[in-house]
Amino acid sequence: MKITKAVIPAAGLGTRVLPATKAMPKEMLPIVDKPAIQYIVEEAVNSGITDILIITNRGKGLIEDHFDRAPELEYALTSRGKTDIYDEIVNISKLAKIYFVRQKETKGLGHAINCARDFVGGESFAVLYGDDVIMGEEPACGQLIRAYEEYGKGVLGIKKVPEADISKYSSLKVEHIKNNVFNCTDMIEKPQTPEDVLSLYSILGRCILPPEIFDILDNTKPGAGGEIQLTDAMCDLARQKGMTAVEYTGTRYDMGNKLGIMQAAVETALKHAEIGENFKAYIKELAASL
Ligand code: UTP
């Protein structure tokens, strides 16, 4: 069956980016002139997704406003003859069918995904983490969907992380199948000792899950950090049936930490049609003085 539904968990507290995220969701942090979550919705749409559920909570109303129509703004843009930006603004509300549900308590990513049960029904679905923006020629979510169509199992989007950082991520046991595709049979969230590390491959930002994940999540106990971890539920799935893992192409920016936010901004500004040239000249001048 074709994957047409996606879930974007965006209910986290974003404590690593305070105070910016005290009143503003981290998913709304701009990368030059577009909020992070719009890049993620566009990636989903470019991968063939038609229906998107965004998991929010209190204080995330700005996300709903961003994907809604804005009649006053639209009127002002039309009357000033700003037709290009008018079209761009209206199109944001037409990207996909976007739904919202609130995660009533912030109990972890697994708990957030479990709020999507009714939306998903009995289908497999894509998950795009709301603070991981991935830019590249081919949408990362689409690369995972292709692997799902070929192997028929849940799919994990993976990349290698530096050894010094693996304790902050998940660690996967993988066997190479072909090219950038692996079979994953075990995993652990935030390995605390070198013996726990299964490999330096970690799940980063994207996955495709079968609907069985919801029954597993119902029985998943709080894990690392006292949160209901999606990795723990996916671990059950991987041990039972195996999951496919795809080392996707594209650059991932972690919008959940300050360095990631700045890398996304600088690299995007350098390529930006309107300010790219001037920004490059500025960066060169600045770099020469460092
Ligand atoms: P993070 O692990 O980055 O959590 O979540 P966080 O709480 O937002 O960040 P810090 O550690 O406090 O800075 C990864 C993704 O899962 C979502 C987040 O919004 C983010 O997109 N999430 C996390 C939820 O939707 N609900 C949760 O309970 C936890």
Image (cartoon, grey):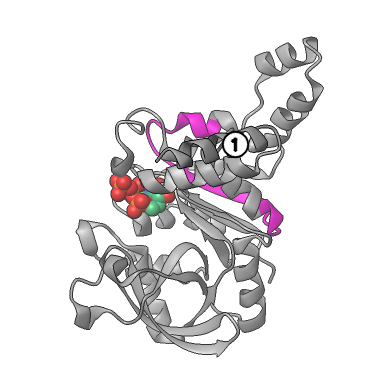
In the image, which residues are magenta? 45-64
Q: Is 10 positioned to the left or the right of 41 in the image?
A: left
Q: Tell me the kind of residue under disc 1.
A: Ala
| Residue 77 found in image quarter | top right
Q: Is 251 positioned to the left or the right of 84 in the image?
A: left
Question: Considering depth in this image, is 257 or 243 the residue closer to the camera?
Answer: 257
- Residue 129 position within the rendered picture, expressed as x and y whole percent measured from the top left: 47, 54
**Mark 1: secondary structure:** helix
| Residue 236 found in image quarter | bottom left
Q: Is 225 positioned to the left or the right of 206 in the image?
A: left
- Residue 15 position within the rendered picture, expressed as x and y whole percent measured from the top left: 28, 41
Give the class, few, some or many, for how many residues have Cα within 10 Å of label 1's Cα (few <14, many ≥20): few
Q: Quadrant of the C terminus?
A: top left
Residue located at (33% from left, 39% from top): 17
**Residue most extreme to the front:** 288
Residue located at (50% from left, 46% from top): 264
Question: Considering depth in this image, is 154 or 164 the residue closer to the camera?
Answer: 164
37 is within the stretch colored magenta: no
- Whether label 1 lies within 8 Å of ligand 1 gets the answer no
Q: Is 227 positioned to the left or the right of 8 in the image?
A: left
- Residue 141 position within the rendered picture, expressed as x and y whole percent measured from the top left: 60, 62
**Residue 68 vertical position relative to residue 263 in the rendered view, above or below:** above
Residue located at (48% from left, 57% from top): 117
Query: Is residue 100 shown to the viewer in this render?
Result: no
Question: Considering depth in this image, is 66 or 228 the residue closer to the camera?
Answer: 66
Residue located at (75% from left, 24% from top): 86
46 is within the stretch colored magenta: yes
Question: Considering depth in this image, is 126 or 175 the residue closer to the camera?
Answer: 175
Residue designated by label 1: 281
Q: Quadrant of the N terminus?
A: bottom right
The number of numbered badges drawn on the structure is 1
